């Protein structure tokens, strides 16, 4: 069964809104360190803080924004988040000191609409299409990041970093128009444990050592990425002697080739079920790329190859980590696990920006890259003990209220391919973990009607 027109419209319009917001956040990554040299009160530590501060406020507000969307409505909360983001962009655009940019970037992150967006996406899609819709959203985020790294230097050459901040403010306002003119209104609004954080499940999720390994992993991955961009623009300008106007043309082939480079690894991980091997190999590749940048950052080819290897590994990990979270999460706590995971990701960006700036100021370029190697080595050690989950999928079914929990649970567990069933009485849903190869959705739906 395919997504219907209503679901496609909701999915792609929301993916566009979120993608544009992420482009606005990340376009300054490859250019800000050079721009910040002309700001008042600037230090390397404050440059890194300005890059990463959005992660701290986003980590703090994303779960509360999601909860507020249950109470006040999805679209009003998303509008508030986009307005805060736009105000932050204007503050950063008009700042003449590094402190003003830090305040602006903090406000950008405080417009934390991710959880509310995912809840609205869940309202607009049927349960059996939700994974596909979430995948489309994930692809839009990944493509937005790659696009931002190319557009940033290109737009910097035309309108400057201040112009980029103004552009992101305009895009945020336009996104509000898209939200009300194009994004459909949901027929019904429900709580969705598969995408939303449930406070009662936080203790269980935070106490799960396997999930904790993945949370630490995404924190380190984004810390490394953000730290790297405190130093990388200086490598291109001062060691490879590329003017900032040409940085986009350096990133473009590297990033495009990296997208193709990740495909074989994803196929091996998913189709041949070598997820752990590919996962650990990607961590090793990331460490190797940072070593190359630390030792050979005066070589054009070494930097290009190092970045190619880094982004191949980064893309593979970015794709596989959410899949692992989904498979390891409690059957009725996937949304909570993803909420903790996202918070870890944003907090990692903050730590990487602030920490990378401090290290650059005290230990120089080489210090940043070698520090990245050190924390990747910690991640590698954590990952060795990771237990791979079974290759099962999460399915949610709405249950008619006349059914008894014990009866329906026993009937569903008796079906081929059903490994786990969890009835959530207050939501009138049952969550299943199933093997799609043998699971029959029509049989399951007949039971819950």
Image (cartoon, grey):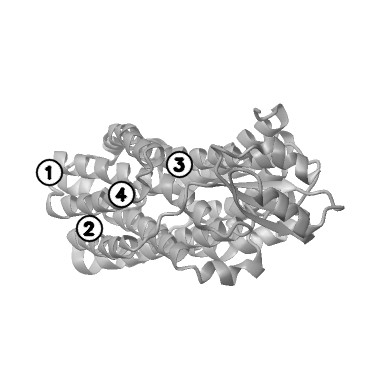
Q: Which residue is mark 2?
A: 369
Residue at 58%, 53% in the rendered image: 85
Q: Which residue is mark 1?
A: 299
**Front-most of residues 438 and 190:** 438
Q: Mark 2 or mark 4: which is in front? A: 4
- Residue 53 locus on image (x, y percent): 45, 62
Q: Which residue is mark 4?
A: 277
Q: Earlier in the sequence, mark 2 or mark 1?
A: 1
Determine the CA span between mark 2 and mark 4: 25 Å
**Front-most of residues 110 and 221:** 221
- Residue 372 locus on image (x, y percent): 26, 60
Residue at 47%, 57% in the rendered image: 95
**Front-most of residues 433 and 202:** 433
Determine the CA span between mark 1 and mark 4: 31 Å
Q: Which residue is mark 3?
A: 142
Asked whether the residues under the numbered discs 2 and 1 touch, taking CB atoms below 8 Å apart as contact, a structural biologist would say: no
Residue at 46%, 52% in the rendered image: 324
Q: Mark 2 or mark 3: which is in front? A: 3
Determine the CA span between mark 1 and mark 3: 28 Å
> Label 1: few (<14), some or many (≥20) within 10 Å?
some
Is 432 on the left or on the right of 405, as rendered? left
Is 57 on the left or on the right of 384, as rendered? right
Asked whether the residues under the numbered discs 3 and 4 touch, taking CB atoms below 8 Å apart as contact, a structural biologist would say: no
Which part of the image, by quadrant, shows the N terminus? top right
């Amino acid at each position: 069964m395919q997504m219907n027109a209503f679901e496609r419209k909701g999915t792609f319009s929301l993916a566009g809104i979120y993608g544009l917001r992420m482009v606005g956040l990340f376009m300054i990554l490859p250019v800000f360190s050079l721009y910040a040299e002309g700001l008042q009160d600037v230090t390397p530590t404050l440059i890194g803080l300005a890059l990463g501060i959005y992660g701290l406020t986003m980590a703090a507000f994303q779960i509360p924004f999601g909860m507020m969307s249950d109470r006040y409505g999805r679209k009003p909360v998303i509008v508030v988040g986009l307005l805060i983001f736009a105000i932050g962009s204007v503050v950063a655009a008009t700042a003449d000191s590094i402190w003003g940019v830090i305040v602006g970037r903090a406000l950008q992150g405080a417009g934390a609409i991710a959880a509310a967006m995912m809840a609205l996406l869940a309202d607009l899609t049927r349960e059996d299409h939700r994974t596909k819709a979430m995948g489309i959203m994930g692809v839009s985020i990944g493509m937005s990041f790659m696009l931002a790294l190319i557009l940033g230097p290109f737009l910097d050459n035309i309108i400057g970093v201040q112009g980029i901040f103004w552009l992101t403010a305009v895009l945020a306002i336009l996104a509000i128009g898209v939200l009300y003119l194009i994004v459909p209104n949901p027929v019904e609004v429900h709580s969705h444990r598969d995408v939303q954080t449930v406070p009662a499940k936080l203790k269980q999720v935070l106490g799960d050592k396997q999930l904790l390994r993945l949370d630490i992993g995404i924190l380190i991955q984004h810390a490394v990425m953000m730290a790297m961009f405190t130093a990388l623009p200086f490598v291109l300008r001062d060691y490879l002697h590329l003017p900032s106007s040409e940085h986009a043309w350096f990133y473009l082939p590297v990033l495009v080739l990296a997208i193709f480079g990740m495909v074989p690894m994803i196929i091996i991980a998913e189709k041949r079920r070598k997820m752990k091997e590919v996962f650990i190999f990607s961590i090793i590749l990331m460490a190797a790329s940072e070593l190359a940048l630390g030792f050979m950052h005066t070589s054009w080819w070494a930097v290009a190859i190092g970045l190619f290897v880094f982004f191949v590994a980064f893309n593979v990990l970015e794709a596989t980590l959410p899949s692992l979270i989904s498979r390891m999460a409690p059957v009725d706590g996937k949304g909570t696990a993803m909420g903790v995971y996202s918070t870890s990701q944003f907090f990692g960006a903050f730590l990487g920006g602030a920490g990378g700036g401090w290290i650059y100021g005290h230990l120089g370029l080489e210090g940043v890259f070698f520090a990245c190697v050190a924390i990747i080595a910690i991640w590698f050690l954590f990952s060795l003990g990771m237990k791979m989950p079974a290759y099962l999928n999460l399915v949610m079914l709405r249950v008619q209220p006349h059914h008894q929990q014990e009866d329906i649970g026993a009937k569903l567990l008796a079906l081929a391919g059903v490994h786990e069933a969890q009835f959530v009485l207050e939501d009138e849903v049952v969550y299943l973990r199933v093997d799609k190869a043998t699971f029959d959705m029509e049989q399951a739906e007949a039971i819950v009607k």
